[in-house]
Image (tube, grey):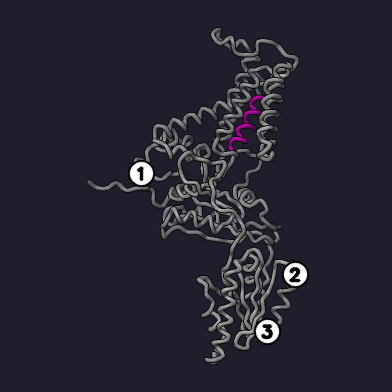
Amino acid sequence: MSHVHEKKETPISRNIVENEAEIKKRLGFGKSFDVGVRTLTILDKHIQIYFVTGLCDIQYIIELLKELMDLDVRGRKTETTNVKQAITNHLTHVQIEYKNTLEDSITQMLSGLIFILIEGEDQAIVIDVRSYPGRGPEEPDTERVVRGARDGYTENIIINTALTRRRIRDERLRHEIMQVGERSKTDICLSYIDGIADPKMVEILKKELEAINIDGLTMADKIVEEYLVKQGFNPFPLVRYTERPDVAANHLLEGHVLIMTDTSPSVIITPATFFHHVQHAEEYRQAPFIGTLLRWTRFIGIIFSLMVLPFWLLLVMQPSLLPPALDFIGPNETNNIPVFLQIVFAELGIELLRMAAIHTPSPLATALGLVAALLIGEIAIQVGYFTPEVILYVAIGAIGMFATPSYELGVALKAARMILIFAVAIFLAPGFIIGTTLFILALAVIKTFQKPYLWPFLPFDPPAMWHILVRASVPSARFRPRIVNPQDPIKQKVKAE
């Protein structure tokens, strides 16, 4: 039985002293240093301005205070009667709204806005003076391109929506914002283009997001993803992440729906198939032929990273499968350690090195590389722990993983490779054949938001598959992908001669 938290609504009292006592009790005034209130007397009425230090632009608040103090001086001369109207007219800001409950007002305050209470009034005036701490847009490390835009999403959701809208100046672009998390109240933005995106998809995502009942989104978009797709033990990524606004804008124009989470520089793209994870922005920054060449090089690298090590192990364990022309494949000398264990230890070593590289400060990264090259490469072979071929094929597998544009897919393929290696070590040729077949079948049955994971390969869609295999020129791509069920399937109209 699910427990739904009922939201208590406390109306704002006309007695400003009662409001002050309740707000100070809830926010821990005197204990938390970063919550504050500024009390003024304007036109013989007490007003209070509540704020959070660090989330507000103090200069804006100072300008507002100056304007209110000037109003007090000018208003006494003209004997102003409607104090609320006078104060509202002198709030020099473009975004002002009213709230009727303390809960709504406090939530807005904790989001970086300020609210003003006026003696004798039962509404709070909320003003957007947010100025979140954070870094400026810069190129994401994981999605670098040789030529192209150098801006990237940041941890600030306001900047992220602006970066997207800068690229799509369409009045039908929608940024629907909501707050998720019983305690964190994290801002989440659902982005789509009205008239292109599938309305059913938008409704499904909206309901799923509103149904999230958790204290806080400490891991931001990753927690949102786990609520949306119910991944279980499936290692393959069911949504795509990007930190590039140009990639996100391109997917919006195709009919995808984006989910932006405050405090995360990554944006979730839905729905996403297997082939969405093997494309990179660099392919579209080069000529179509070069882009196709890059894409095929990446495809071959991914296939090699998955298949070459299990296949080589099979040939080593069953030399009878080798034709005479390929007798050179396999170790020339026997070691005390079986080849299978050499592969497992080498894979473990590569994974530990990758983790160490992530956690190693930049000044020490060069030293780590030298240690890895000397210890794992040369000395380990000379001592006799590893044969050179094991190091070669494990390295090929690692390079293929690093060449995969999606980090999540690269790690999932590594897990699949290890399962294939164990299948070969135990069952030899039948293990390789059955393991490969089960791998393809497992991908075929996966669905993400009721969309086939291997589309357009299964079910087969020839035009879409052509655009997967070949980086076609932009003028020739006239239709949006059918997988997203776009409301307007034609991307660009052909002009009549």
> From mark 1 to mark 2, how far is it between C-alphas?
58 Å
Residue 28, label in figure = 2
For this rendering, which residue is in front, 289 or 35? 35
Q: Position of residue 475 (x, y in %)?
A: 34, 42
Q: Position of residue 304 (x, y in %)?
A: 56, 26
Label 3 vs 2, first from the N-terminus: 3
Residue furthest left as drawn: 497
> From mark 3 to mark 1, how far is it between C-alphas?
63 Å
Residue at left offset 52%, top offset 51%: 258
Residue 478, label in figure = 1
Q: Which residue is mark 3?
A: 15
Q: Amino acid at mark 3?
A: Asn
> Does 168 appear in magenta?
no
Label 1 vs 2, first from the N-terminus: 2
Q: Amino acid at mark 2?
A: Gly
As drawn, is 375 to the left or to the right of 321? right
Quarter of the picture containing the N terminus is bottom right
Residue at left offset 69%, top offset 32%: 368
Do residues under tags 1 and 2 come within 8 Å of each other at their CB atoms?
no
Q: Bounds of the magenta span?
A: 408-422
As drawn, is 170 to the left or to the right of 190? left
